[in-house]
Image (spheres, rainbow, N blue to C red):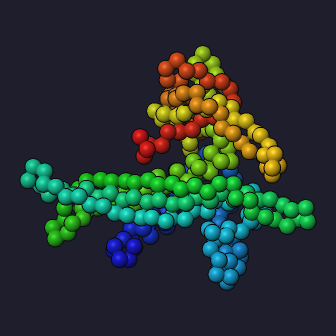
């Protein structure tokens, strides 16, 4: 980042990520949040052992069920210039990607606390805007102040959505004359979102290891979110497909459309 003169921009994203993530999770009303300050001792111990908090996450502290660790692994800026109607314009795009690791507290028979890794996912997002070129510079004035909080917010929303999907997967809890009620609200969906609907998942035991494996249900179709409240969302199926109670719901990623 220093070589690309992007230290300040990336620093602003990382600094605001904590607050954005906590605000997004709080709005989900699914978690009681504990600030990561309670991990200070564990972090200090890892540092003394030259271990990474992300690569070797400690078990959640006493009284905490889950920890979410986010590692930003890519940050990039792209600029494109054009002359529009005699005015020099520049489009500035920021891209960021991160790994999200979700750890659940587990307790051994002897009482020792362990960290069980539930999920490790890669997420990415980007923001862009167009402005006038500042004389003597390739960069538009003022766009960084606007884009950095937006980038952090989008990254936080995707990280929170992954955490919610793993711990509290969105599912249909009621079907009434074609209207689907989903047990996730505004922290998860917004009006107009397109979602995929999957049949109820099945759980099977691996005969070799004894591990319980969750098998996703088949895709039943897509639906469009029609209304959202803090705790629930409602949707209507597209086409003639039908959904049933217990079916899982997953948002279609805007960045992949």
Residue 133 appearing in the image: yes
Question: Does 187 appear above or below 2?
Answer: above
Q: Residue at x 53, y 39 (%)?
A: 251
The front one of 1 and 153 is 1
**Residue drawn 78% across the image and 46% down it:** 206
Residue 240 in the image: above or below residue 246: above
Q: Residue furthest left?
A: 86
The quarter of the picture where residue 37 lies is bottom right
- Residue sitting at the far right: 110
**Percent of width and height locating residue 125:** 44, 53
- The percent position of residue 53, horizontal first and vertical second, equals 64, 71
Q: Is residue 143 left or right of residue 60?
A: left
Residue at 68%, 77% (x, y): give it: 46
Residue 149 shows in the view: no
Judged from this view, the residue extending furthest toward the front is 208
**Left or right position of 27 against 46:** left
Of the 4 image quadrants, the one containing the N terminus is: bottom left
Locate the C terminus and report the quarter of the image it occupies. Answer: top left
Q: Position of residue 199 (x, y in %)?
A: 65, 30
The image shows residue 128 at horizontal and vertical percentages of 33, 53
Quadrant of residue 45 within the rendered picture: bottom right
Q: How many marks?
A: 0
Residue in the picture at 61% in, 57% down? 120
48 vs 222, left or right, is: right
Instruction: Find the residue positioned furthest to the top.
Output: 177
């Amino acid at each position: 980042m220093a070589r690309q003169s992007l230290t300040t921009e990336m620093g602003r994203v990382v600094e605001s990520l904590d607050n954005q993530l906590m605000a997004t999770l709080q709005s989900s009303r699914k978690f009681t949040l504990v600030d990561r300050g309670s991990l200070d001792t564990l972090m200090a111990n890892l540092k003394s052992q030259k271990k990474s908090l992300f690569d070797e996450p400690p078990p959640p502290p006493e009284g905490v069920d889950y920890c979410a660790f986010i590692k930003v692994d890519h940050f990039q800026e792209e600029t494109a210039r054009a002359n529009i109607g005699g005015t020099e314009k520049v489009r500035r795009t920021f891209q960021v990607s991160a790994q999200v690791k979700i750890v659940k507290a587990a307790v051994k028979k002897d009482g020792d606390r362990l960290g069980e890794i539930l999920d490790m996912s890669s997420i990415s997002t980007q923001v862009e805007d167009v402005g006038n070129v500042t004389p003597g510079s390739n960069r538009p004035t003022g766009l960084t102040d606007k884009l950095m909080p937006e980038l952090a917010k989008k990254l936080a929303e995707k990280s929170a959505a992954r955490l919610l999907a793993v711990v509290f997967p969105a599912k249909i809890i009621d079907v009434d004359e074609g209207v689907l009620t989903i047990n996730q609200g505004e922290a998860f969906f917004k009006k107009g979102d397109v979602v995929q609907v999957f049949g109820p998942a099945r759980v099977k035991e691996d005969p070799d290891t004894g591990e319980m494996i969750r098998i996703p249900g088949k895709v039943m179709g897509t639906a469009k979110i029609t209304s959202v409240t803090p705790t629930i969302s409602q949707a209507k199926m597209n086409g003639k497909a039908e959904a049933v109670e217990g079916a899982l719901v997953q948002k279609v990623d805007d960045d992949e459309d």
